[in-house]
C-alpha cells in the first residue's frame, strides 16, 4: 500500500519529538511536514536574536485577537513559529516543567497515562541537564538544558529580594516539590546557542532513510475514506498536492492551527461548518473552544544606579556584546529572555504556588514597541497567574487557507482569575520593596503608581498586558466523550487514523511555560502510539 506509516503535521516542539521517536524503527516510514522554512536563519541560533526572528514574517504565523474589554478594545497580535522547530525556534527559551499536580490533574480528567509518574519519566528521558541526573531530571537525553552564567550585582539583588520574601532559593527551580521558590531559570541553550526542538530532536536523525522532512509544506485539511483519515492536502510552492498514509496522521500544529485544520476537514460545530459551505464529517462543537492562555503584564522599575544590563543592548555596548558572542558564544547575547524565575502564592491558604515571576536585568522602551531598551538603567519582571480558568476560542472564518481565524481571548472572565491577577501584581511590588534590591530602585515606571487600586490593576492588565504565548485546550483531551475532542490516547473522536499531540490537547494549562510540557507529553504520546502499533501487529 502506498503512503507513509505516519504523517506528522507541524515540526514544532511536539512534531520534532514525534518524528524522532516514531522513526526509530527503520521499517516505519515517517513524513514530517512544516509550513515554514528550514531553521537556518542566524538569529534563530543566537538566543538574544529572538526580537529579530519574532518580527520576521517569513518565520512566524501571525494571529490577531478580536477587540474586547480585556485587551482595551485593541486587537492583540499573537505569533507562533513558522519554521523547523516551530515556536521552540522563536521562543524565550525558558525551560519550565510545570508542577506535578498539573499532570495529576490532567490524568484525573483523561487517564493515568498522563500522571506525573509518566510525565516525570518522560522528562528524565528527554533531558540532558547541566545539573546531571536527578530523581526526575535527565542527564543523557537529546535536549540540552543549562543554567545562566551571567551573575552580577543586580541579578544577585533580585535573587536576595526573593529570599527576603520567604521564597526558598532552588538550585533546580523545576524540582518537583510545589513550594514557593526562586532561582536561576533553566533554559534551552547549549554552548551559547538555542536548543530548539529541531536542534535537539531532528538534527541527530536527519539522515534516517525512513524520515522525510518537508518544509514549505502547508496542510489545508485531512482527507478521509469514510471516517478513516487517509491523506492530507497540502500547498507547497503554490502547488496543491496530497500526501497519503497507510497508518496514521498526527496533528502537531499547536493550539491555534490544529483546531483550524479539523474544522476545514469537516470536524467541528455543524452550524459553523455548514455556514462556511463545509460538509460535516463529524459533529463536535468543542473543536476550537476551551482556549486558555496566561495573561501576563510587564512591571518595570527605573534604577538609581547604572547596574542594569540596558547599556549592553544599545550603542557601543551592543557592538561589544555582539563581538563577544561571535567570538566566544558567551555574554549578554547568549542569554535567554529571562535570567531568574519565582513561583509564589498570591494569597494565604493555597496549597501550591499560583503565580510566576520572570526576572530580567534590563527594561524595555515601550515607545518603541519593546524593540529596544530604555536609555536609563532599569529592570522588569513578567508576571502572571499560573492556572487561569477563563476560556476563549479560535475558529476558522473561511475555507481559504490564508484567511485569519477568529481569536477571542476572554481574559479575566472569572473572579478567580481577577483575584489572582491582582495578587500577582501586589506581590511583585512587595518583592521590589525588599532589600538589597530596594536600595537601587528609583521608581516604578510600568504600569506605574497611577495603577494602584484593584480596579486600576485590572485596567493595567487590559491596557498593557500581553499573551504569554502559552495557549492550550482547543482540542481538549478527556475521558468524557461528550465534551472532549480527543480521547486519552489522543485519537480524534468520531474518526479513525487521526491523532493530535500539541498544546491544544491539554485540558488545563500547566503551571508555567509550555515548551517543556509539550515535549514531555509528546514523548509520552510516542510511547502510547508505539504500544498501540505493537498490539496491532499480526501474531
Image (spheres, rainbow, N blue to C red):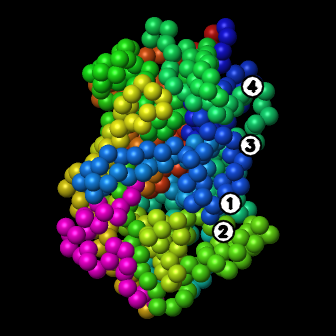
Circle 1: element type: loop
Magenta stretch in the rendered image = 440-467
Please give the residue where the numbered disc 1 appears in the rendered image.
46
* Mark with earlier residue (2, 4): 4
Q: CA distance from mark 4 to mark 3?
A: 15 Å
Q: Residue sitting at 56 percent across and 78 percent down?
A: 310
Please give the residue where the numbered disc 3 appears in the rendered image.
203
Q: Are marks 4 and 3 in contact (CB under 8 Å)?
A: no
User: Which of the two discs, 1 and 3, sits closer to the camera?
Assistant: 1
x, y percent for residue 496: 47, 16
Circle 4: element type: loop
* Mark with earlier residue (2, 1): 1
x, y percent for residue 493: 39, 21
Q: Are marks 2 and 4 in contact (CB under 8 Å)?
A: no
Q: Rate crowding at label 4 as few (under 14), some (14 to 19) or many (20 or more) other CA atoms within 10 Å.
A: some
Q: Are marks 3 and 2 in contact (CB under 8 Å)?
A: no
The answer to whether residue 529 is seen in the rendering is no
Q: CA distance from mark 3 to mark 2?
A: 23 Å
Circle 2: element type: helix
Q: Residue sitting at 50 percent across and 84 percent down?
A: 376
* Mark with earlier residue (3, 2): 3
Q: Residue sitting at 37 percent across and 74 percent down?
A: 446
Q: Residue sitting at 61 percent across and 76 percent down?
A: 314
Q: CA distance from mark 1 to mark 3?
A: 17 Å
Q: CA distance from mark 2 to mark 4?
A: 37 Å
Please give the residue where the numbered disc 2 appears in the rendered image.
333
* Mark with earlier residue (4, 3): 3
Please give the residue where the numbered disc 4 appears in the rendered image.
210
Is 508 drawn above or below residue 238 in the view shown?
below
Q: Rate crowding at label 3 as few (under 14), some (14 to 19) or many (20 or more) other CA atoms within 10 Å.
A: few
Is 323 drawn above or below residue 187 in the view shown?
below
Amino acid at each position: 500500500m502506498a503512503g507513509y506509516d505516519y504523517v506528522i503535521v507541524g515540526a514544532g516542539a511536539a512534531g520534532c519529538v514525534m518524528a524522532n521517536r516514531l522513526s526509530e524503527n527503520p521499517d516505519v516510514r515517517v513524513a514530517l511536514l512544516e509550513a515554514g522554512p528550514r531553521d537556518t536563519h542566524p538569529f534563530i541560533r543566537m538566543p538574544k536574536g529572538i526580537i529579530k526572528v519574532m518580527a520576521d514574517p517569513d518565520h512566524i504565523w501571525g494571529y490577531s485577537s478580536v477587540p474586547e474589554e480585556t485587551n482595551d478594545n485593541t486587537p492583540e497580535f499573537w505569533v507562533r513559529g513558522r519554521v523547523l522547530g516551530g515556536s521552540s525556534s522563536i521562543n524565550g527559551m525558558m525551560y519550565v516543567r510545570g508542577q506535578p499536580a498539573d499532570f495529576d490533574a490532567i490524568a484525573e480528567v483523561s487517564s493515568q497515562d498522563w500522571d506525573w509518574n509518566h510525565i516525570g519519566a518522560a522528562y528524565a528521558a528527554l533531558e540532558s541537564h547541566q545539573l546531571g541526573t536527578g530523581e526526575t531530571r535527565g542527564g543523557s537525553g537529546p535536549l540540552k538544558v543549562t543554567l545562566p552564567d551571567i551573575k552580577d550585582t543586580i541579578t544577585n539583588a533580585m535573587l536576595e529580594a526573593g529570599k527576603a520574601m520567604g521564597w526558598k532559593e532552588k538550585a533546580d527551580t523545576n524540582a518537583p516539590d510545589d513550594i514557593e521558590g526562586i532561582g536561576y531559570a533553566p533554559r534551552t541553550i547549549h554552548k551559547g546557542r538555542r536548543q530548539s526542538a529541531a536542534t535537539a530532536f531532528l538534527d541527530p536523525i536527519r539522515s534516517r532513510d525512513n524520515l522525510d522532512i518537508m518544509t514549505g509544506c502547508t496542510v489545508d485539511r485531512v482527507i478521509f475514506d469514510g471516517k478513516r483519515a487517509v491523506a492530507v492536502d497540502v500547498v507547497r510552492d503554490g502547488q496543491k498536492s496530497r500526501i497519503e498514509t497507510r497508518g496514521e496522521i498526527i496533528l502537531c500544529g499547536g493550539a491555534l492551527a490544529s483546531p483550524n485544520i479539523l474544522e476545514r476537514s469537516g470536524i467541528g460545530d455543524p452550524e459553523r461548518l455548514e455556514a462556511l459551505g463545509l460538509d460535516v464529517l463529524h459533529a463536535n462543537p468543542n473543536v476550537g473552544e476551551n482556549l486558555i492562555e496566561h495573561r501576563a503584564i510587564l512591571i518595570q522599575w527605573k534604577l538609581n544606579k547604572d547596574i542594569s544590563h540596558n547599556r549592553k543592548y544599545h550603542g557601543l555596548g551592543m557592538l561589544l556584546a555582539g563581538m563577544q558572542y561571535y567570538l566566544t558564544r558567551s555574554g549578554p547575547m547568549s542569554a535567554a529572555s529571562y535570567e531568574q524565575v519565582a513561583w509564589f502564592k498570591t494569597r494565604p491558604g493555597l496549597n501550591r504556588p499560583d503565580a510566576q515571576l520572570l526576572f530580567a536585568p534590563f527594561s524595555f522602551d515601550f515607545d518603541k514597541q519593546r524593540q529596544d531598551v530604555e536609555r536609563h538603567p532599569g529592570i522588569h519582571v513578567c508576571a502572571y497567574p499560573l492556572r487561569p480558568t477563563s476560556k476563549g476560542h479560535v475558529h476558522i472564518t473561511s475555507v481559504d487557507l490564508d484567511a485569519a481565524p477568529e481569536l477571542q481571548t476572554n481574559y479575566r472572565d472569572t473572579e478567580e482569575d481577577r483575584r489572582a491577577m491582582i495578587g500577582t501584581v501586589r506581590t511583585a511590588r512587595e518583592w521590589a520593596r525588599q532589600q538589597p534590591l530596594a536600595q537601587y530602585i528609583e521608581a516604578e515606571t510600568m504600569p506605574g503608581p497611577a495603577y494602584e487600586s484593584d480596579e486600576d490593576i485590572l485596567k493595567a492588565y487590559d491596557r498593557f498586558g500581553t499573551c504569554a504565548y502559552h495557549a492550550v485546550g482547543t482540542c481538549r483531551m478527556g475521558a468524557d466523550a461528550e465534551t472532549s475532542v480527543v480521547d486519552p490516547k489522543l485519537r480524534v473522536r468520531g474518526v479513525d487514523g487521526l491523532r493530535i499531540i500539541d498544546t491544544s490537547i491539554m485540558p488545563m494549562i500547566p503551571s508555567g511555560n509550555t515548551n517543556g510540557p509539550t515535549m514531555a507529553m509528546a514523548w509520552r504520546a510516542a510511547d502510547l502510539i508505539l504500544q498501540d502499533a505493537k498490539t496491532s501487529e499480526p501474531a
